[in-house]
Amino acid sequence: MKRVLFIQPPFFRFLGIHARYFPYALVGMGTYLENNGHHVRVFESDHCKEYGSLNFADQESLYENYLQKLKTFTDPFWESLKREILDFAPHFIGISVWTTFIASAIRTAQFCKEIWPDATIIAGGPHVTLLPDDIKKIRAFDIGVIAEGEQTVLEIVNGNPLHSIQGIFYSENGSVKQNRQRPFVEDLDDFGIPDRSLLINYENYESEDLGLIMSSRGCPFSCAYCATTIWKNKVRSRSTERIIEEIKIVKRKYGTVYFTIKDDVFTVNKQRVYDFCKKLKQDKIGVYWECNSNVNTLDRDMLIEMRSAGCVAIKVGIESGSDRIHRIINKKLNNKIIMSKMKMFDGIGMHLTCYFMMGIPGETKDDILKTLNLAHSIRPDYISFSVYEIFPGTELFRLGVEENTAIDHMEIQDYFRVHPHNYFFQNHKRHLAGMSYDEFDFLEKYMKHKVNKYNRSPRSIFLRMKYRLPLYKKSPAHFFSDLKKFVKWI
């Protein structure tokens, strides 16, 4: 039996922002290792018992705090990580690496290597898959895992010869060797139900945060800004029986009555949605839930069925109010379709969040203002707004490099110098080719002000409370938790 410590590196903690949920992928991988005879702990660096800021619109203004925290190991967080490592004495340490917090992942690996040099340090996650050459430059990482990691990491921990393990790169005799990629696993049920008790201090998580669920992997769509291309536009789903079983277990063990299904598009398979809803009602589990969707996969009958099975909130990506931009991002939407689809939600009783963004390559001031106008025309219950960030492996990344607004790679030291929302931009002061920095900065502040005002309106606050009311009746503790968050938010 080997001891394996998985670490989600600090990011929101160093920003001072409250982090929700838990690292589902790491807990799932840990469960698979436990089921195969090993001992696992999962350390989520971002989880704090006390709430940080809940205004995610401020995130970009806090990036300098994050970079400053990474310059030394003096933050109290590092001492807590040291204690966990020394107490557990792991044979292997797995670190999740995402583009947004790659600098933190590197620092975490270097820290672990310094205080516990005997452990083999494994890097995994989207950035390792999309830009493996970055990780190959970091000596603190011993092995990199590309794409799906459960079977790969198990073979590493089992001690299989590295040259025989698919889906990894590693150093040997002064050079880096990369093996061929491992095929995707077809039956996700083989990985088991993620055991939340592997989380260090899992008892400090709120029951709702432990209600995070992934019922599938992949997305069939090809939105030009999204890096889900690592799944090759293929969707693989866990069985309805296994998802229902997970919901029952989490409700029984942690008192969770509100679940968040975090699939890229939960509603991509209509029959699967109907089967899931039917089973929820048949078993009378008595939970509420939310999910992500694409409006092109929805119809009114499906929404009615979902609502009858406890779905009280749904989130959909609209992104832009410009038909021209929709064509650029390959969203398969236009304003006519959007306005028609929004009528489906009338009288359903679901809380509707719509995602919008600005800064998409090729965008103009007129396009950005069209997005704001569309958002106000739709009148969703909540607007989630962001500024476009470049992610490797996307079509917009390729187009950005072609039009000279993006660069095809970054030097490692730049990840510690540049704010994460500016990663891969050719000019950090100029996000759009036809717009000055000052004009873009003004529009960004204007859009955020308008969205913030919309979300803080009495109507939006009332609608949020309204959809949470059944949850409050079932679990009054959620009301007091939400009240604390609301006071922090305002």
Image: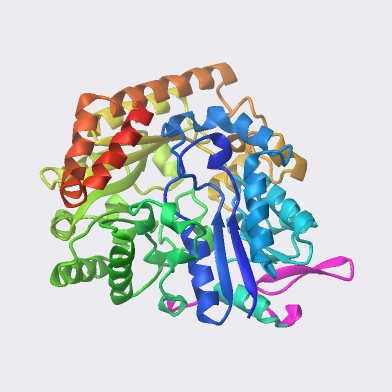
Looking at the image, is 406 positioned above or below residue 261?
Answer: above
Residue 39 horizontal/vertical position (percent): 58, 74
Residue 105 position, x and y percent, is 66, 51
Image quarter where the N terminus lies is bottom right
Query: Would you say 407 lies left or right of 320 here?
Result: right
Residue situated in front as seen by the camera: 476 or 390: 476
Residue toward you, 90 or 362: 90
Q: Is residue 223 left or right of residue 372?
A: right
Residue 122 pos. (x, y %): 68, 64
- What is the quadrant of residue 64 in the picture? top right
Tell me the colour scheme of the image.
rainbow
Q: Which residues are magenta?
A: 161-187
Q: Is residue 167 magenta?
A: yes
Q: Which corner quadrant holds the C terminus?
A: top left
On the image, the x and y values in percent for residue 250 come to 33, 65
Q: Residue at x 65, y 29 (%)?
A: 428
Residue at the left extreme of this rendering? 347
Q: Residue at x 59, y 62 (%)?
A: 6
Query: Is residue 341 visible in the rendered structure shown here?
Result: no
> Is 410 rendered above or below residue 302?
above
Q: Let me know if residue 487 appears in the view.
A: yes
* 373 inside magenta stretch: no
Give me the residue at 62% from left, 35% from top: 66
| Nearest to the observer: residue 102 or residue 426 | 102
Up/down of 26 relative to 344, above or below: below
In the displayed structure image, the side of residue 108 where residue 175 appears, left or right: right
Residue drawn at x 58%, y 38% is 14
